[in-house]
Image (spheres, rainbow, N blue to C red):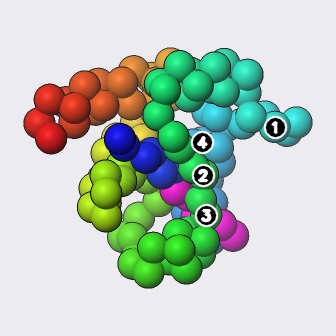
């Protein structure tokens, strides 16, 4: 079973505007987009959202950049979707398709 870890920097720093773009794809001022929530539930995979400081505390490791989507299988952590690819997403649909494509590749190569 794969655990998806959605990782972002908090509190934001110089990367604040990049963070806002990613954040706006999945959240609104009143919470997570319902479309995004439906998508995540449709994956039938456990997931968690962590800020970078929470990630460091829990997994005892550093990341080079955020936002980032990691996959965890047993004790192995791998980058599923890189910061660069996330930052290219302009819409929620772009991000959903990217995740689906990476999950398909990840499933068949692991």
How far apart are labels 1 and 2 at the CA level?
13 Å
Q: Which residue is mark 4?
A: 21
Counting residues from the start of the chain, the first of labels 1 and 2 encountered is 1
Picture residue at 39% right of the left edge, 78% below the top = 61
Q: Which residue is mark 1?
A: 31
Q: Is residue 5 above or below residue 39?
A: below
Q: Which residue is mark 2?
A: 49
In contact (CB < 8 Å): disc 2 and disc 3: no
Counting residues from the start of the chain, the first of labels 1 and 4 encountered is 4
SS for tag 2? strand
Q: Residue furthest left?
A: 109
Picture residue at 61% right of the left edge, 64% below the top = 51
Q: Which residues are magenta?
A: 7-12
Label 4 crowding class (10 Å Cα cut-off): few <14, some 14-19, many 20+?
A: some
Query: Is most of the magenta stretch helix, strand or loop?
Result: loop
The label on residue 71 is none
The label on residue 51 is 3
Q: Is residue 97 above or below residue 102?
A: above
């Amino acid at each position: 079973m794969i655990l998806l870890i959605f990782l972002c920097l908090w509190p934001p720093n110089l990367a604040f505007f990049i963070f806002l773009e990613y954040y706006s794809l999945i959240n609104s001022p009143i919470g997570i987009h319902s479309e995004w929530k439906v998508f995540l539930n449709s994956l039938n995979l456990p997931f968690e959202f962590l800020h970078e400081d929470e990630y460091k505390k829990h997994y005892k490791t550093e990341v080079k950049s955020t936002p980032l989507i990691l996959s965890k299988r047993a004790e192995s952590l791998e980058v599923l979707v890189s910061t660069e690819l996330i930052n290219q997403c302009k819409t929620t649909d772009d991000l959903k398709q990217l995740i689906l494509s990476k999950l398909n590749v990840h499933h068949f190569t692991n």
